Amino acid sequence: MKRTLILSSAGFAGTVALMFAGASAPSIAQVFRNHDSNAPVNFNADRIEVQDRADRVVVSGNVEVTQAGMTLNAARMTVAYSKQPGGGSNGVDIDRIDASGNVVVTKADQTARGNVAIYDLNSKLITMLGNVTLTQGANRLSGGRLVMDLNSGRSTVDGRSSAGGVPGAATSPSGRVSGTFTVPQRKN
């Protein structure tokens, strides 16, 4: 299995991009790669409020959203949609999901956690802000912001969240990324 760790620096915010490629076992790149953002989106929550004039749905209380093997959990989500002739169910296409409150995204053995998440279904990007962690088995990365590209499977973690006033999306005090990677035992 080929494993590449790409490190770069942008000002004082370090960026770590993980690209795992290989055929034997699922990896971070393979699990989220080519996610079907056109698949049906299923909601489960304590409360769902449709705000039709604003083209949004507010979902709260133990929210669980599933789509094509990926699960998104949070305390609250706002779902922005557009009305399209020939769109999804009843001519509605979901464009974006904003989640807050202990946000967890899982698919297979991958878990991403953060305070806030934005899932842009059109660009197939999930951006998580505030105390983010990305784990696969014993491998773990922590930082302020995580961007998952569901097309390429590339996940980028940096130390600062560019929250721009988003509640709960605090930046890590050090502005740095930390991580732990397991190393396979080698024969002498």
Image: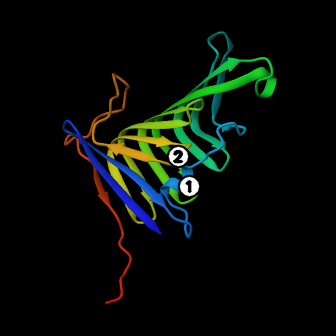
Q: Secondary structure at mark 1?
A: helix
Residue 136 percent across, percent down from the top left: 46, 60
- Mark 1 lies on residue: 31
Give x and y (percent) for residue 103.
48, 41
Residue 58 point in image, percent of width and height = 59, 24
Which quadrant: the C terminus?
A: bottom left
Above or below residue 172? Residue 186 is: below
**Relative to 9, does residue 51 appear above or below in the rendering?**
above
Dot placed on the residue nearer the N-terminal end, 2 or 1: 1
Q: Residue furthest top?
A: 53
68 relative to 19 in the view: left or right = right
Q: Mark 2 highlights which residue?
A: 152
SS class, disc 2: loop
Which quadrant of the structure image shows residue 66?
A: top right
| Image quadrant in which you'd find residue 73 | top right
Q: Is residue 43 above or below residue 177?
A: above
Which residue shows up at 55% across the image and 56% down it?
30
Q: Residues within 10 Å of mark 2 (few under 14, many from 20)?
A: some
Q: In front here: 76 or 156? A: 156
The amino acid type, in three-letter code, at marker 2 is: Ser
**Residue beneath the point at 65% across and 50% down:** 69
Marks 2/1: CA distance? 10 Å
Q: Nearer the viewer, mark 2 or mark 1?
A: 2
Query: Which three-letter amino acid code belongs to the residue tagged 1?
Result: Val
